[in-house]
Image (spheres, rainbow, N blue to C red):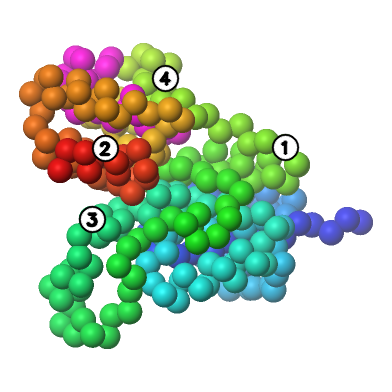
Amino acid sequence: MSKKPKLAVYKFASCDGCQLSLLDCEDELLAIAGEVEIANFPEASRAVQEGPYDVTLVEGSVTTPHDAERIKEVRQQSKVLITIGACATAGGIQALRNFSDVKEFTSIVYAKPQYISTLATSTPISDHVPVDFELRGCPVNKYQLIELICAYLNGRKPNIPTYSVCVECKRRMTPCVAVSKGEMCLGPVTQAGCGALCPAYTRGCYGCFGPNETPNTSALSEWWTEHGRDKAELVRAFRGFNAWAEPFRKESERHE
């Protein structure tokens, strides 16, 4: 009998939402559990087996000196390392600190900031170690997560779309909220994966899945400006869950 591949899940600075997406798979997770050995997943079990691991999922960004070293250890014991969610792939909402002075934040929030050990920035895992695949989302799409795990276990390329949220809007026959409602919507420059959830409720896309494959952020900003949006609104629009993703970061900085 062949030995089952080992799966590990690690958490860094995050809200645990992407790990919960995996647990939310329910029946699908049971099927995966039958094919792999869940060797390290504290969110699901206290049982921990030592590496090396065949596939490792990492949620969260690197925000402390300790985590900057810990991710190197995780990489060393992982044959395949996959980052999941906006925090792990783009620094997350906490990367908003990158645009300002973190010392000022800690002095306001904490009574004794001298005890806080943190980095000046919140950065994606790929800034510190090589990553084999990045799965976007805040949180990730559980079906994309299952597809990704199955693809690596079967030695094939993951079938994850890289087109924009606008395609998902068209597929569910949702009227364009930017055109019909005048909403600021990041859909044209955001990768699909959410099923166009926000536009379905007549709200603009917030960019939860990060920039799509070829985002034309400058054209979107120009369109917003022509329709009466000021620079401050443009900056806020691009500084959300994926503010530190390069296309969004550069576009927001262009309007400061």
* Magenta stretch in the rendered image: 175-195
Which residue is at a point 38% across and 54% down the rendered structure image?
91
How far separated are the C-alphas under marks 1 and 4?
A: 25 Å
* Between discs 4 and 3, the one toward the N terminus: 3
In the image, is residue 178 part of the stretch drawn in magenta? yes
* Between discs 2 and 4, the one toward the N terminus: 4
Marks 2 and 4 in Cβ contact (< 8 Å): no
Q: Which residue has dot 1 on it?
A: 156
The N terminus - image quarter: bottom right
Which residue is at a point 15% across and 82% down the rendered structure image?
111
How far separated are the C-alphas under marks 2 and 4?
A: 23 Å
- Whole-percent x, y for residue 75 in the image: 61, 64
Q: Looking at the image, is 239 positioned above or below residue 99?
A: above
Marks 3 and 1 in Cβ contact (< 8 Å): no
Classify residue 218 by image quadrant.
Answer: top left
The mark found on residue 167 in the picture is 4
Which of labels 3 and 1 is toward the front? 3
- The type of residue carrying mark 4 is Val
Q: Looking at the image, is 203 positioned above or below residue 155?
A: above
- The type of residue carrying mark 3 is Phe
* Between discs 3 and 1, the one toward the N terminus: 3
Q: Which residue has dot 2 on it?
A: 251
How far separated are the C-alphas under marks 1 and 2?
A: 35 Å
Q: Which residue has dot 3 on it?
A: 99
